[in-house]
Image (cartoon, rainbow, N blue to C red):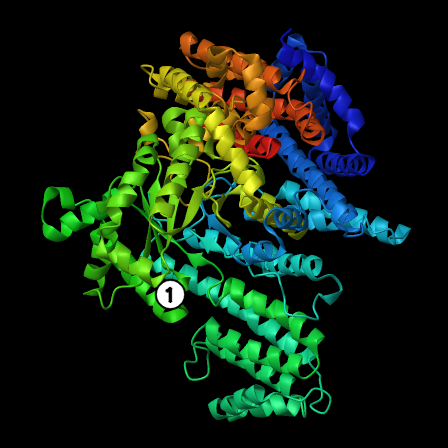
């Protein structure tokens, strides 16, 4: 019996007793209602089959029984094709409901904290309030306030195909969540509870009967609509609520009655319908439509909010006289539109502040309708008018009216502008150089495959968007695989050629994206050379010497393994930050992180606090991808907590103590870092560079089949087949290993590296004193906790390379041994009770889906399948891909 499995069945029994009663109640209720729905749909026999498989996989874990697991496998193999699909769907639905119960308990916990008296010692240690207090103790109150004003959090939504659920399923889950939340209301009576139970049953039945697989891939505009749904459900209220909570704490009893101290520090970006690197479905036309849809949504929201705030300002001019500036603004509005102002007067006689805001709401509506005569030229003009109203109210003796709802409206405009999220365009550097070659010789053979006209049309689309919605709607242009300063200069040249000259070209901030291990090491030199380009120097002058540099976590990890990539990214950030300081540049490092640990995933706040000195510098910009968007922002209360944690960490990263600790640790453990880098990279390359590795990888995981899953508009592969890792995108690379219950991309190479170091005392000291190392070890621990050796062996047995399979299993065991040694635990996640509890309780249910997936894979690997058997096995596999993703709460 291995240490992992022995501890596993013991800890699962413990976990069952540690579940909080409210969460146990929710899981029990939802499971019971799902069982009722299954029995009604497929008769009692379907429920019996689900329960039989569930009991076998639980017994296999609790009793550490290979016999029980083999019996479960035999049971799965014996299921009829249609029944196997139904059982897989049932386990997938269970995970969606279990995830919801966990989310509801987290919300319950947050509400419980929120009910406490908001004094400093009762603030969570990772709250903005606590961070501000600690920072002020180090640098003084005034300097802490100054730093707070410079704070910036910039999440960028991307449409990478890592959200395995259909929108219809997500919507159904959200409705079930709302009903589950209602049951926490202590005022709910027996009749209301009975009605709630009936509605829950109806929604679960609806979810069960909804097809879990999309018929076709979503288009880029479908992905835009999904993102706009997150704005409606969360962003539109959560961001201003974040500012308000921060200001309430900073000002105490003066909150909402004095000028705000909390800045509007969030800006939203999007790559959806802007990222054309490897996605032929993103065109100039879709880019234009994406911006138009986002602008329409945010302007509609602003019009409604402005009208609502205006209608509430029923302050009579006798008691709150208007300022001269407000009277002047009103006169200008009357000249602009007599009809609009006459309506405002009719609705609000002798209420000048109300009149101005109602007229402003009308102008926002005109902006949405593209009425150039009446609409605003840009959000800055609206902000100027709102601040005129605010100043008049404050001067007229009504500070609460000035700094209450009106201030939240101002924050809203500052955050979203008239475009909601800035659309960022991304394209591969090779496409730019090929397009320039095409312009030089359109008839050459090499030029025939270049989408040259579409590349030029992209720049015309950017210019059109800027003219319509303002420069900030689309000015950032990311260059994938930046390998020279010329790659950046090419963008400016193409923009000028597309628009017929520099005077017509759009305003562009070109952002290099350093992705591979080699590119990360070359980044400072490339940036140095880029400073010679006159276009870049001109933009630095115009922006106050502000610049962004993007770091890719995915390809660097696939390049050299997770350990070496983590260390290389730290070193790159350190050197780029030093380069920026030497050149007097205000730098924002843009983190291209994914959800999986092999793509930079893990807790964002811990990652921020482990960064090199001056690399964050009060600005944190990061990609938010796939299921991470829904997990972090789908529920407003969880979104609020996540943003607060990120903001607190970003603020604390500037503290002298944080910077000193990270710098000292990096220096103290530099020799250890070099040893870990070399040993882990060598071990990783021995595996992935072995002859025949790529085909073997496709054999032992569902890598090929992932491309059939209609979860995103972007293709999973860079070509038709995968002959090497270069052909494969990072997302399916991570997704496939996760599905095989191996999670290799999160840990491979670490065990060998730690074994080579061999000094337990040194490694334990590093874990306590070196934040980067501690974060890496904890992330690996989480990745290991989601693996299962017994299931992994069955996936590895699908291949014909015992040497590679053995290398994976040996490294897995070695890595776990050293992680437990360093953390001083007897089992994984022992010190993370909540997380450990969730993983331990889920794993047997994931095992059931893994066994069904293995059945499908074995059949698909067979050459003797009829067309119907092929279709059935493929469909079954796709269902399990979604189910395992839901169970592990991770795709790519």
253 to the left or right of 800: right
Q: In which quarter of the image is residue 101?
A: top right
Which residue is rendered at x = 62% and y = 8% of the image? 2
Residue drawn at x 14%, y 53% as measured from the top left: 439
Above or below — where is 21 with respect to 796? below
Residue 554, how many percent across, how many down? 41, 34
Q: Please, is residue 572 above or below residue 829 in the view?
A: below
Q: Residues within 10 Å of mark 1 (few under 14, many from 20)?
A: some
The location of residue 757, given as percent across then percent down, is 48, 13
Name, please, the residue furthest toward the top: 1
Q: What SS does tag 1 mark?
A: helix
Residue 547 appears anywhere in the view: yes
Left or right: 132 in relation to 164: right
State how many labels appear: 1
Which residue is denoted by mark 1 in the rendering? 471
Query: Which is nearer the eye, 560 or 733?
Result: 560
Left or right: where does residue 279 sit relative to residue 25? left
Tell me residue 379's x, y (percent). 48, 71
Q: Where is residue 713 in the image (x, y as percent from the top left)?
A: 41, 45
Q: Can residue 165 be seen in this view?
A: no
């Amino acid at each position: 019996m291995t240490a992992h499995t022995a501890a596993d069945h013991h800890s699962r029994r413990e976990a069952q007793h540690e579940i909080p009663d409210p969460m146990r109640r929710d899981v029990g209720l939802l499971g019971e209602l799902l069982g009722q729905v299954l029995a009604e749909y497929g008769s009692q026999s379907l429920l019996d089959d689900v329960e039989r498989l569930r009991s076998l996989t639980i017994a296999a874990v609790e009793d550490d029984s290979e016999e029980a697991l083999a019996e479960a496998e035999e049971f799965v193999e014996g299921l009829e094709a249609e029944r196997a699909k139904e059982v897989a769907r049932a386990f997938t639905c269970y995970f969606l409901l279990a995830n919801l119960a966990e989310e509801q308990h987290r919300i319950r916990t947050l509400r419980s904290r929120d009910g406490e008296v908001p004094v400093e010692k009762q603030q969570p240690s990772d709250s903005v309030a606590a961070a501000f207090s600690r920072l002020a103790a180090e640098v003084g109150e005034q300097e802490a306030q100054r730093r707070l004003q410079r704070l910036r959090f910039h999440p960028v939504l991307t449409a990478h195909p890592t959200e395995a659920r259909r929108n219809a399923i997500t919507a159904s889950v959200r409705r079930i969540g709302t009903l589950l939340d209602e049951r926490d209301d202590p005022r709910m009576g027996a009749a209301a509870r009975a009605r709630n139970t009936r509605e829950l049953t109806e929604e679960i039945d609806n979810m069960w009967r909804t097809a879990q697989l999309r018929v076709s891939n979503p288009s880029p505009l479908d992905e835009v609509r999904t993102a706009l749904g997150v704005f409606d459900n969360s962003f539109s209220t959560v961001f201003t609520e974040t500012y308000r909570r921060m200001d309430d704490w900073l000002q105490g009893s003066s909150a909402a009655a004095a000028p705000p101290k909390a800045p509007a520090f969030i800006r939203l970006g999007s790559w959806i319908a802007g990222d054309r690197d490897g996605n032929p479905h993103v065109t100039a036309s879709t880019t234009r439509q994406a911006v138009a849809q986002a602008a329409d949504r945010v302007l509609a929201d602003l019009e409604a909010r402005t009208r609502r705030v205006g209608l509430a300002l029923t302050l009579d001019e006798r008691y709150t006289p208007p300022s001269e500036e407000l009277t002047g603004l009103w006169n200008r509005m009357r000249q602009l539109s007599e009809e609009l102002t006459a309506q405002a007067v009719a609705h609000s006689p002798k209420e000048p502040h109300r009149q101005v805001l109602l007229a402003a709401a009308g102008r926002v509506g005109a902006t949405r309708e593209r009425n150039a005569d009446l609409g605003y030229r840009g959000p800055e003009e609206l902000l100027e008018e709102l601040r005129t109203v605010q100043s008049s109210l404050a001067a007229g003796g009504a500070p609460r009216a000035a700094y209450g709802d009106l201030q939240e409206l101002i924050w809203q405009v500052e955050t979203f502008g008239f475009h909601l999220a800035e659309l960022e365009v991304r394209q591969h550097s090779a496409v730019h150089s090929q397009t320039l070659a095409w312009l030089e010789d359109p008839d050459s053979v090499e030029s025939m495959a270049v989408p040259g006209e579409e590349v030029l049309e992209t720049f015309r689309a950017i210019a059109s968007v800027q003219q319509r919605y303002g420069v900030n709607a689309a000015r950032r242009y990311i260059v994938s695989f930046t390998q020279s300063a010329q790659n950046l200069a090419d963008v400016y040249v193409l923009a000028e050629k597309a628009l017929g000259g520099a005077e017509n070209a759009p305003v562009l901030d070109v952002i290099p994206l350093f992705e591979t291990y080699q590119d990360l090491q070359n980044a400072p030199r490339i940036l140095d050379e880029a400073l010679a380009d006159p276009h870049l120097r001109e933009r630095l002058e115009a922006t106050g010497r502000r610049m962004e540099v993007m770091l890719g976590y995915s390809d660097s990890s696939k390049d050299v393994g997770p350990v070496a990539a983590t260390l290389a990214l730290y070193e790159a950030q350190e050197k780029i930050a030093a380069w920026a300081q030497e050149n007097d540049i205000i730098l924002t490092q843009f983190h291209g992180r994914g959800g999986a640990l092999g793509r930079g995933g893990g807790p964002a706040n811990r990652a921020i606090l482990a960064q090199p000195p001056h690399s964050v510098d009060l600005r944190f910009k990061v990609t938010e991808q796939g299921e991470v968007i829904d997990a972090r922002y789908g529920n407003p209360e969880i979104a609020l907590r996540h943003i607060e944690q990120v903001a607190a960490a970003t603020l604390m990263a500037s503290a002298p103590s944080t910077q000193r600790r990270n710098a000292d640790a990096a220096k103290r453990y530099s020799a250890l870092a070099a040893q870990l880098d070399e040993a882990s990279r060598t071990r990783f390359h021995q595996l992935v560079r072995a002859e025949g590795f790529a085909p073997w990888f496709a054999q032992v995981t569902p890598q090929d089949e992932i491309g059939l899953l209609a979860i995103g508009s972007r293709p999973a592969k860079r070509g038709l087949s995968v002959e090497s890792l270069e052909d494969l995108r990072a997302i399916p690379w991570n997704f496939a290993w996760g599905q095989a219950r191996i999670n290799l991309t999160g840990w491979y190479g670490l065990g060998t590296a730690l074994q080579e170091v061999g000094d337990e005392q040194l490694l334990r000291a590093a874990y306590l004193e070196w934040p980067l190392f501690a974060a890496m070890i904890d992330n690996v621990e989480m990745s290991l906790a989601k693996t299962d050796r017994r299931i992994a062996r069955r996936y590895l047995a699908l291949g014909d390379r015992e040497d590679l399979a053995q290398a994976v299993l040996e490294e897995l065991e070695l890595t776990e041994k050293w992680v437990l040694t360093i953390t001083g635990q007897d089992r994984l996640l022992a010190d993370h009770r909540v997380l450990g509890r969730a993983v331990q309780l889920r794993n047997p249910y994931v095992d059931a889906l893994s066994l069904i997936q293995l059945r499908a894979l074995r059949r698909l690997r067979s050459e003797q399948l009829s067309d119907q058997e092929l279709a059935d096995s493929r469909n079954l596999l796709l269902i399990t891909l979604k189910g395992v993703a839901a169970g592990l709460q991770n795709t790519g």
